[in-house]
Amino acid sequence: PGAPSSLVTLSLMGSSAQSSVAFESSRPCWNETLCLRLYSLSPSAAPDAVLTLRPEHGGPPLGMLRFRLSDACQLDYSGEAPSLPEPAWHALCPTPAGGEAFMSEVLLLLELVLLDKPAQSLRPPPLLRPSTRRAYVQVIVVGLRNLQPHHRPAARKPCLELSAGGGRVEGVRRTARSETPTARSPNYNEQVLVPVELPDNHLFCPELEVVVLDELFGGLATLRLGFALLRFKDRIPWHSRRSVEIARREEVYENQVFHASSSSWVPTLTSPPPWSDSLRAPTSKAEIGLQGPGWNWEADWAVQVRQGVAAARQMAARPADAMGGGQTDGAGWEYAARFDQPHWSASPRVSEKKSGTLALF
């Protein structure tokens, strides 16, 4: 049979929200925001939220996903609208109601917004539909082998239907029907160009759907014998833009002073603390975590060395009261007479500040 029309429901503590219906698609796409408003709720003590994939006209659910509110990301809306982190793929579990088990995944982002007042209004949800560009997927169709339809009549003269990115009629291509050398192992030897709107961010790349169709009653009816999904995002010739747009740099500074009596550098005691951010607020590498689901560290902590013209440019771009940005020695240390005077001094004898930078992208 064809793919069912489906929708998703989000439920938590007696409240639920429902998406629109995706009609007859094996890879439904919604790009919608489901919002639940709850009161007097502690994320750590809240029960699991449940996302359920259901067929439109009832029947057993197609899949289910449970997640904790404590795993949701929390963004700062006090200023300008923040950038959303990358969503992530989650495997749907088979439901207890039974039915056929499908290897399905859902791409989503869970966000928790804390309200100061019960009647406080939320900002309009951001536009979720990714930016795309027109492209063509070239497929060399050789043939089928050992076609054995499950609970279907034997193949007579099958063809292949190929589509990607929503399954619109203008984006569907078919091969010629063939029964050569046999209907169970037909050859096509065709080149098919499938038009598709490919997203700039590869995470949202659709899959190429290949459906085996056969005709009944002399072509008056069409029978679906089987289908397959092919991933091709690794073959997209351009780079993903989204990962560049939300890249965030984290910095931690180690602060030391020169102890004259022992002729050695020792960690600071109070202001600034031994480890701080660029504005001298206490922090450490262990306290800097990921912004939410979908964020990943691109590299390990590394010492940043700035010398020459690059140091001068970074110094001019930083706030006047911020630490770092100036010229460093080969080990990443920056020297000055005081912490509020970030000037380079080549002689450690007159230096009273030693500030090192650890940067992670």
Image: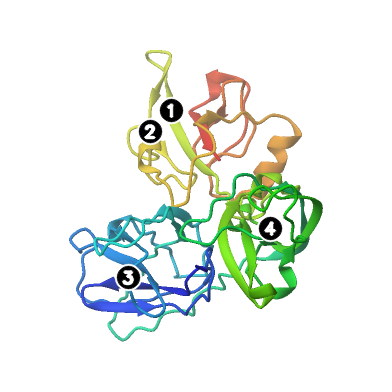
In this orientation, which residue lies closer to the viewer: 210 or 200?
210
Is residue 37 visible in this depiction of the protein? no
- The label shown at residue 256 is 1
Q: Badge 3 is on which residue?
A: 114
Name the image quarter holding the C terminus.
Answer: top right
Mark 2 Cα-neighbour bin, 10 Å: few <14, some 14–19, many ≥20:
many
Label 4 or label 1, whichever lies nearer to me, is 4
Q: Residue at x 48, y 56 (%)?
A: 150
Nearest to N terminus: mark 3 or mark 1? 3
Q: Residue at x 66, y 78 (%)?
A: 220
Distance (Cα) linking label 3 and label 4: 32 Å
Element type at marker 2?
Answer: loop
- The label shown at residue 200 is 4
Distance (Cα) linking label 2 and label 1: 7 Å
Distance (Cα) linking label 4 and label 1: 46 Å
Pointers 3 and 1 in contact (CB under 8 A)? no
Pointers 2 and 4 in contact (CB under 8 A)? no
Where residue 17 sits, quadrant-wise, is bottom left
Q: Amino acid under label 4?
A: Asp
Q: Badge 2 is on which residue?
A: 274
Mark 1 Cα-neighbour bin, 10 Å: few <14, some 14–19, many ≥20:
many
